[in-house]
Image: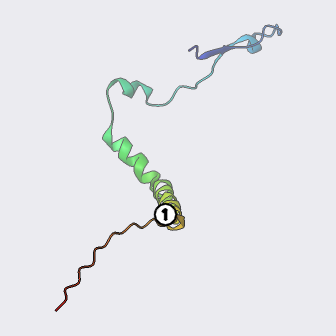
Amino acid sequence: MNDVMQAPRGGSDEATRKVQPLFPKVAGAEQDAEGIDLREILAVLRRRFAVIAGCAIVLMALATVKIYQLTPRYTAQATLMLEQQ
């Protein structure tokens, strides 16, 4: 995939003809070659804890509502043995 976008050819101004990146460089992208930093992952999880917990609570609530709305299907079988005295 080409990550460079060129300006349209209609303009003669040098500023409009510059090549612009479609995806800006991310700070710390050079660290990707070194590996995954556990501290960064934990920091992201701590920052986004409210969003993660909120999604989990909403999904559990929706599942609970769905379960209680299901029509119960009970099947039972019994054998009654009577002894005469």
Expressed as whole percent of the image width and height from the top left, the position of residue 85 reads 16, 92
Q: Is residue 29 above or below residue 46?
A: above
Q: Is residue 81 above or below residue 22?
A: below
Residue type at mark 1?
Answer: Ile
Quadrant of res 13: top right
SS category of the residue bearing label 1: helix
How many numbered dots are placed on residues in this image? 1
Q: Quadrant of the N terminus?
A: top right
Q: Is residue 22 above or below residue 6?
A: below
Residue located 74% across and 14% down the image: 15
Quadrant of res 82: bottom left
Q: Seen in the image, is 14 located left or right of residue 85?
A: right
Q: Seen in the image, is 78 located left or right of residue 11?
A: left
Expressed as whole percent of the image width and height from the top left, the position of residue 12 reads 82, 7
Q: Seen in the image, is 5 located left or right of residue 31?
A: right
Q: Which residue is mark 1?
A: 67
Residue located 23% across and 79% down the image: 81
Q: Residue furthest left?
A: 85
Expressed as whole percent of the image width and height from the top left, the position of residue 77 reads 33, 69
Residue located 31% across and 73% down the image: 78
